[in-house]
Amino acid sequence: MEKRISVFVRVKPVDGVQQWEVDPSHTEINSLDKKDKFRFDHIFGRTSTQYEVYGRIQPIVESFLLGYNGIIMAYGQTGSGKTFTTFGNTNNPGIVRQAAGEIFERIQQDSSKSYSIRVSYLEIYNEELKDLINENNKPKVRENAEGFFVSNLDERNVKNQEELMHELNLGDEIRHTRATAMNSLSSRSHALFRITLITESQVKQSEEDGKTSLMQKDEQQNSTIKTKSILYFVDLAGSERLSQTKAEGEAQKEGCNINLSLLTLRKVIQALSINSQKDGRIENNGINSGESQTTKQSHINYRDSKLTMVLKENLQGNSQTAIIVTINPLELYTETTKGSLQFAETAQHVRTIVRINEIIDDKRRIEDLLQECKRLRRLLDQVKSVDNIQQGLLIQSQNYGNGQQSFGIPGQRNTFGIGILNIPKKRKVSIYGNGNIQDNEDEGFNRPPKPTNAQM
């Protein structure tokens, strides 16, 4: 299933001279001088609520429960509302708390499946990884044949929303923050909160559907379907200008690393957007171009940042993705806001191919192979049957064309009476008239011919 990245913009409610205004349709935002105009899936104005925001990204949570991967990412300048949108607080729950509530409510209502949920919390600070659930761990980005993965990262089993939020809150307490000129509690790192859902369901099959093997008959024809889906909530560190944050020393180093990491993310999104256009898959404001192109794909360098390495699979393929870009509409931040909107505009052209993540164990793999063998045997029998019938009809046509009324084949003795054409696999064609009688050793089919008038 092909999906386009969903892009939303949220305008921070602030006082002062503002440079941007939202169109009443809530899909377009314009600069006051009308020089810049951007269109997105939805734009949340200054009066938008946390519940309105969650309502727009809820389909990703819905798909997550069905076995699809998802990622919800907050991007924007320092102090524009990313962390508030993602995590919120007790009185104004953010996306994570609302999603957790819905996930546990849904699985508790569904008794037809068994569920297990694990969570992990990773911080990327100055290009170093930190486990926010277990500080003693030393996470590392590693690579195998399937791609990048993070080793030495704790995953905790949680049984309800309260346990999930407990792990999240513990991680928030040790996440790196710092006061800057733009934000009294600025996040100085990227935070990646991950929920992993394992679902098992029993599917009853019948022999008629062609999916029952000998192994299944011994197990009352029940098959276990298992899926594993992952949902990321990513609160990115704020993009910033050092001249505005007035950062010095360690804070300046943090700012440089943040900007470098975000620059790599922007480059990756740009390359993915270009490749989508080259694939002829680009959608412009909801309308597919329909143009297929075969231009060489742009190289995408994920290795320049730990962030892009960790999120590679989600960004390039198997994940439904939503990006919420938060902006400060004050005139002072016009250029920074414009840069954020340009990033958002690029991101909405990226398309991914998503699929349900079914876990195939050895037993299930054997089942699938047995079913495939049965399917291929049936197909082979059908092909042989058609070929034999066509062969018999071809011989008949040739003999009639030669003035013969038989299935006679040159070099073989013709007899009078009933001609019998033996076809393998218990398929026989007989006619009255001149024909051939051949023994079928496989089936012992030697029926004597019907007596002729001369014999009667």
Image: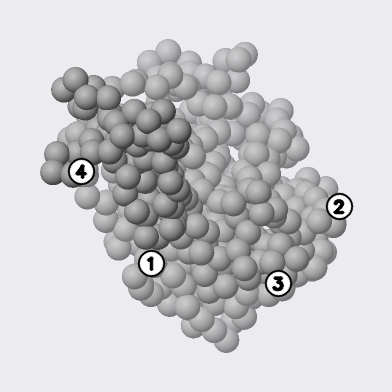
Q: Which residue, given by chain and number where applicable, does mark 1 sit on?
A: 146
Q: Residue at x 44, y 57 (%)?
A: 443
Residue 135 seen:
yes
Q: Residues within 10 Å of mark 3 (few under 14, many from 20)?
A: few
Q: CA distance from mark 4 to mark 3?
A: 54 Å
On residue 109, the disc is: 2
**Quadrant occupied by the C terminus:** top left
Q: Amino acid at mark 3?
A: Asp
Task: Decide which of tag 4 and tag 3 comes sooner along the chain.
Answer: 3
Q: Residue at x 43, y 19 (%)?
A: 287
Q: Is residue 94 above or below residue 416?
A: below
Q: CA distance from mark 4 to mark 1?
A: 66 Å
**Marks 2 & 1, CB-CB < 8 Å contact:** no
Q: Which residue, given by chain and number where applicable, does mark 4 sit on?
A: 413
Quarter residue 158 falls in: bottom right
Q: Residues within 10 Å of mark 1 (few under 14, many from 20)?
A: few
Q: CA distance from mark 1 to mark 3?
A: 35 Å
Q: CA distance from mark 2 to mark 3?
A: 31 Å
Task: Decide which of tag 4 and tag 2 comes sooner along the chain.
Answer: 2
Q: Nearer the viewer, mark 4 or mark 3?
A: 4
**Marks 4 & 2, CB-CB < 8 Å contact:** no
- Name the residue nearer the viewer: 363 or 245: 363
On residue 218, the disc is: 3
**Marks 2 & 3, CB-CB < 8 Å contact:** no
Q: Nearer the viewer, mark 1 or mark 3?
A: 3
Q: Amino acid at mark 2?
A: Gln
